[in-house]
Image (tube, rainbow, N blue to C red):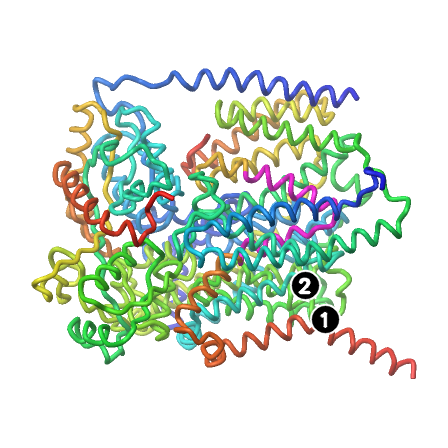
């Protein structure tokens, strides 16, 4: 019985201390430093450690650390299509010591009324874009039905295409819908778990067509196992100089499929702090050594400064809205 | 039927049937009927297996007239432990892992009957140090 | 060729990378919640400045030894570091209770090393043809493999088969929580962001296995000052390795389990998590000592560990030949290869053969080194079974909670672990099988996705589609055999007995 009493005591003590601790943690928001940065920075990655997005961050942080002169700790906070991480960013004080990766178009999932988000693009400062991993149209390298985009489109109008993507609402799915709408293709969507599944299903001829990003397809394209019919970018990629863009081939239509990895701060951050970040990002992302390293990883660097990244994010939001019905983003 | 002699299988069965009914109902309300197909099939499986388990439970109850009486005094320790763990987790969320552990670890050791003060302090300090070195210094993980 | 490989491997850098990888991987693997993927992702930028051979040998050594490290805590503390080690906990912990912890850890090290080594050899010699087999698999095959995986419940269910099946089905239902990847519908999320990506596997595992044991130990709080061994009136055995005469008993087991692990490892998406389960199931069905299973069987343990380490080599096969990363860890290793100019594909085995074969030989070597490191530390770590519960439980619990937190940096996962702890405690008490629940949870989403997508891919004629695919036919035959096997084998046993009597 004595031991039970002690156990009870444990609980009471814990409770009391919880209350104290709760009180304490509320008051540590700091005013913006005069000299930024004076201590360590937290960088939130909304995706799992080891993925393409994580690699984009972990390769840049050593350069940023050198430029800013403080330690940057990368933290992977995943879930809710990135919004757990962005929620964290917005909960932290707007002092520049917490920064998060910002992904276009993942961020637009706040448009889904079912997710009840009060935040929108204006909650963030779109600091800089680092990587633009454009989408591509990919078929099996030995598939002689599809010589080029033209033959693909003709075949797709006459026959139903089995099309692999990385899930409903993924960039890959959206570009397939765009093709369906703008060119009248007949597409059956197969929402697989990720690019690895699409890739092997394409190689095994279980699917007709797949949609992958440049980073996804680069190695298989070089080895000839996969053919890339076009890239959905505004200009040809330096990593795929021989692959035409969609807009180049279809002059009267326009389809872009961006997947961007940039950075965002919380809105309301002190101007001096934002400027310091801006300067650091500009210098580090454009560092030729860094650009070369990322390209060898299949991630094309595409620096956009604050003004450009912000207006770009707004533009893309508008095009995202046209997909809201397909995504089921409506009130119940 | 004495309430105390009710078989655990039957209690579990009733709980599962209630959960099944609720989740089936929720599945019927999904926007896209395709999303409900698999869950519904699984729920039907659950109901079938639950029925079999319950039937077995009733049989056991009939055969075994002197069913074990639920010993509620025995349940106190796990319930207290669970409460302590939950409070520890809540404390962790608010005060951080290291403070929460510095409180929880020696208290729970004491509660379990450890009276060696050296062990109480040494183990707590050692645990915190180990976690600090591995999680914070080596792996640079985020801590609550 | 052989000489180049040897001299490449014997450089100090490579040897340091090898040792750091093996030891580091083992520590990380032994901690619940910390995974090889995490360690590799963090170390990746460090490896850029190393030589390609040293870098990749280190990364692959972490991958394989993290799998093994998980078995130590699974055996001694009933705390599987990864879902792949859950079956190890089932067999290893009862052995620990009997004072045979050292033997169990020794067997686990040996089997892991052998499984990993065989898979490395397969990777060295027959990677390209094996990769071609993996391309025969797509969504319909994924579905059937998941179903085949679920038949393993028959071997895990314990005292009551219906209860085991029931728990498997409950696991399948729990797996549907989250946003559906195919329709975008939010299923059973109750409007919570935390549930959008579903229940996380590792917190559920930590709850069902570790916290439930903490709870049941505390139920026995009067004996809390006694250690695990004292409470079971056991003494710590000193036997560590099987004797030479026992080896033949395990030989076939190791080979079959490794082959199973390699095959499951090369399949895209199917998930290396189930390699150990299928190997375990196979071992049980072939065993002459089936009664030991579930109650501390070294054979079962050997099968799990050989199986899950063989998955590592298997997962590298589609990666190195086709640049398809079959697992999250493989994806990170791909990054490591690219930055060093090693591009997956057939050229890797021709133009860059010197480097590639050096890396693969290093990988094989790391599996051997792992056995020695593991056995060397086994003698010390096994002493945790001598620590009284009043010290052990207050240490295990914080570690498992912080481990649950570390995966996604989310307190919600900690609460999930506690919830599953209670669930697991009650389930154990009333003979509902928690391994069956875990298996359902692991396989649920793969099974559903496979089924729903093959419905689309079949363009309406599902039966014809399935029966028109040779691998599907093989898998269906395997499923039927797996279900019918217990019935057939008991018939056989009866006949044998009758013959004897006659």
**Left or right of C484 on screen, residue C461:** left
User: For residue C11, which quarter of the picture?
Assistant: bottom left
Are there few (<14), some (14-19), or many (20+) residues within 10 Å of tag 2?
A: some
Q: How many marks?
A: 2
Q: Residue at x 43, y 44 (%)?
A: C196
Q: Is residue C432 magenta?
A: yes
Q: Is residue B50 above or below residue A190?
A: above
Q: Could you say whether the residue bearing mark 2 is in a helix, strand or loop? A: helix
- Which of the two residues, A28 or C305, is positioned nearer the viewer here? A28
* Residue C461, percent from left and from top: 44, 76
Image location of residue C40, percent across then percent down? 41, 49
Asked whether C45 or C14 is in front, the reply is C45
Earlier-in-chain disc, 1 versus 2: 2
Whole-number angstrom distance, CA of label 1 to CA of label 2: 9 Å
Q: Which residue is mark 1?
A: C486
| Closer to us: C179 or A35 | C179
Give the extent of the magenta segment: C416-443
Seen at 17% across and 74% down, the residue is: A148
Q: Is residue C355 visible?
A: no
User: Residue A289 in the image: x percent, y percent?
Assistant: 18, 48
* Residue C340 included in the magenta stretch of the image: no
User: In the displayed image of the protein, which residue is found farthest to the left?
Assistant: A251
Tag 1–tag 2 contact (CB < 8 Å): yes
- Residue assigned mark 2: C154
Residues behind callouts 1 and 2 on a single chain: yes
Magenta region, mostly helix, strand or loop? helix
Question: Taking A186 as reference, is C276 above or below it?
Answer: above
Disc 1, SS: helix
Q: Chain of mark 2?
A: C
């Amino acid at each position: 019985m004595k031991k039970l009493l002690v156990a009870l005591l444990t609980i009471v003590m814990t409770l009391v201390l919880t209350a104290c601790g709760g009180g304490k943690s509320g008051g540590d928001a700091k005013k913006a430093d005069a000299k930024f940065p004076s201590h360590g920075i937290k960088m939130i990655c909304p995706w799992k450690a080891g993925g393409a997005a994580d690699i984009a961050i972990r390769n840049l942080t050593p350069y940023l650390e050198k430029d800013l002169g403080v330690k940057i700790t990368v933290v992977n906070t995943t879930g809710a299509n990135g919004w757990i991480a962005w929620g964290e960013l917005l909960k932290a004080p707007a002092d520049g010591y917490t920064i998060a990766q910002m992904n276009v178009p993942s961020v637009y999932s706040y448009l889904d009324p079912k997710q009840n988000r009060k935040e929108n693009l204006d909650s963030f400062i779109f600091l800089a874009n680092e990587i633009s991993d454009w989408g591509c149209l990919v078929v099996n390298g030995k598939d002689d039905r599809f010589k080029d985009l033209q033959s693909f489109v003709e075949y797709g109008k006459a026959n139903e295409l089995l099309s692999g993507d990385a899930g409903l609402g993924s960039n890959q799915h959206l570009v397939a819908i765009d093709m369906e709408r703008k060119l009248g293709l007949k597409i059956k969507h197969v929402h697989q778990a990720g690019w690895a599944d699409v890739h092997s299903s394409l190689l095994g001829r279980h699917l007709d067509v797949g949609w992958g990003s440049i980073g996804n397809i680069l190695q298989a394209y070089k080895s000839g196992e996969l053919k890339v019919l076009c890239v959905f970018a505004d200009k040809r990629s330096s990593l795929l100089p021989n692959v035409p863009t969609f807009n180049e081939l279809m002059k009267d239509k326009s389809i872009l499929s961006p997947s961007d990895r940039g950075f965002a701060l919380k809105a309301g951050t002190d101007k001096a702090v934002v400027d310091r970040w801006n300067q650091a990002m500009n210098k580090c992302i454009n560092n030729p050594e860094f650009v070369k390293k990322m390209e060898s990883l299949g991630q094309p660097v595409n620096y956009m400064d604050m003004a450009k990244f912000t207006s770009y994010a707004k533009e893309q939001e508008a095009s995202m809205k046209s997909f809201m019905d397909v995504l089921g983003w409506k009130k119940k | 039927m004495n309430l105390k002699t009710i078989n655990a299988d039957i209690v579990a069965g009733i709980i599962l049937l209630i959960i099944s009914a609720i989740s089936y109902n929720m599945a019927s309300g999904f926007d896209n009927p395709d999303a409900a197909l698999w869950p519904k099939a699984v729920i039907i499986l659950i109901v079938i297996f639950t029925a079999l388990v319950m039937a077995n439970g009733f049989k056991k109850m009939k055969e075994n007239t002197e069913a074990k009486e639920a010993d509620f005094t025995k349940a106190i320790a796990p319930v207290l432990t669970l409460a302590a763990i939950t409070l520890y987790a809540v404390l962790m969320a608010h005060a951080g892992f290291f403070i929460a552990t510095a409180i929880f670890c020696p208290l729970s050791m004491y509660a379990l009957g450890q009276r060696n003060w050296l062990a109480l302090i040494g183990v707590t300090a050692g645990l915190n140090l180990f976690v600090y070195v591995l999680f914070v210094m080596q792996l640079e993980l985020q801590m609550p | 060729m052989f000489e180049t490989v040897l001299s490449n491997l014997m450089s100090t850098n490579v040897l340091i990378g090898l040792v750091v990888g093996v030891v580091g991987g083992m520590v990380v693997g032994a901690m619940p919640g910390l995974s090889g993927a995490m360690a590799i992702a963090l170390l990746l930028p460090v490896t850029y400045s190393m030589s390609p051979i040293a870098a990749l040998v280190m990364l692959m050594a972490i991958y394989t030894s993290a799998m093994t490290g998980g078995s130590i805590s699974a055996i001694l503390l009933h705390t599987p570091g990864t879902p792949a080690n859950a079956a190890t906990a089932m067999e290893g912990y009862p052995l620990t209770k009997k004072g045979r912890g050292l033997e169990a850890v020794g067997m686990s090290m040996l089997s892991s090393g052998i499984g990993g080594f065989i898979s490395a050899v397969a990777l060295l010699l027959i990677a390209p043809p094996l990769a071609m087999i993996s391309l025969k698999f797509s969504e319909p095959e994924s579905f059937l493999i998941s179903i085949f995986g679920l038949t393993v419940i028959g071997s895990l269910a314990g005292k009551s088969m219906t209860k085991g099946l029931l728990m498997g089905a409950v696991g399948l239902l729990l797996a549907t929580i989250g946003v559906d990847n195919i329709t975008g519908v939010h299923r059973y999320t109750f409007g919570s962001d935390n549930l959008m990506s579903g229940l996380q596997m590792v917190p559920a595992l930590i709850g069902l296995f570790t916290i439930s044991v903490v709870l049941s130990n505390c139920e026995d709080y009067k004996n809390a000052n006694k250690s695990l061994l004292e409470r079971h009136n056991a003494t710590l055995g000193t036997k560590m390795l099987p004797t030479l005469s026992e080896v033949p008993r395990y030989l076939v087991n190791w080979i079959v389990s490794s082959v199973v692990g390699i095959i499951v490892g090369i399949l895209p998406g199917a998930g290396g998590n189930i390699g150990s389960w299928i190997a375990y199931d196979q071992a049980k069905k072939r065993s002459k000592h089936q009664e030991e299973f579930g109650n501390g069987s070294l054979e079962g343990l050997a099968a799990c560990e050989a199986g899950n380490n063989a998955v590592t080599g298997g997962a590298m096969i589609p990666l190195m030949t086709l640049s398809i990363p079959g697992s999250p860890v493989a994806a990170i290793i791909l990054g490591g290869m690219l930055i060093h100019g090693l591009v997956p594909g057939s050229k890797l085995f021709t133009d860059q053969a010197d480097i590639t074969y050096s890396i693969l030989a290093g990988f094989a070597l790391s599996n051997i080194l792992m056995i020695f490191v593991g056995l060397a530390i086994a003698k010390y770590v096994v002493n945790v079974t001598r620590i009284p519960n009043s010290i052990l439980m207050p240490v295990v619990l914080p570690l498992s909670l912080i481990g649950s937190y570390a995966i996604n940096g989310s307190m919600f996962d900690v609460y999930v672990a506690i919830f599953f702890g209670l669930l697991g405690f009650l389930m154990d008490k009333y003979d509902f099988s928690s391994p069956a629940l875990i298996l359902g949870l692991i396989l649920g989403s793969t099974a559903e996705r496979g089924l729903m997508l093959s419905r689309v891919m079949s363009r309406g004629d599902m039966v014809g589609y399935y029966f028109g695919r040779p691998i599907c036919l093989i898998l269906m035959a395997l499923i039927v055999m797996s279900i019918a096997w217990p019935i057939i084998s008991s018939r056989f046993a009866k006949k044998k007995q009758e013959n004897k009597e006659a």
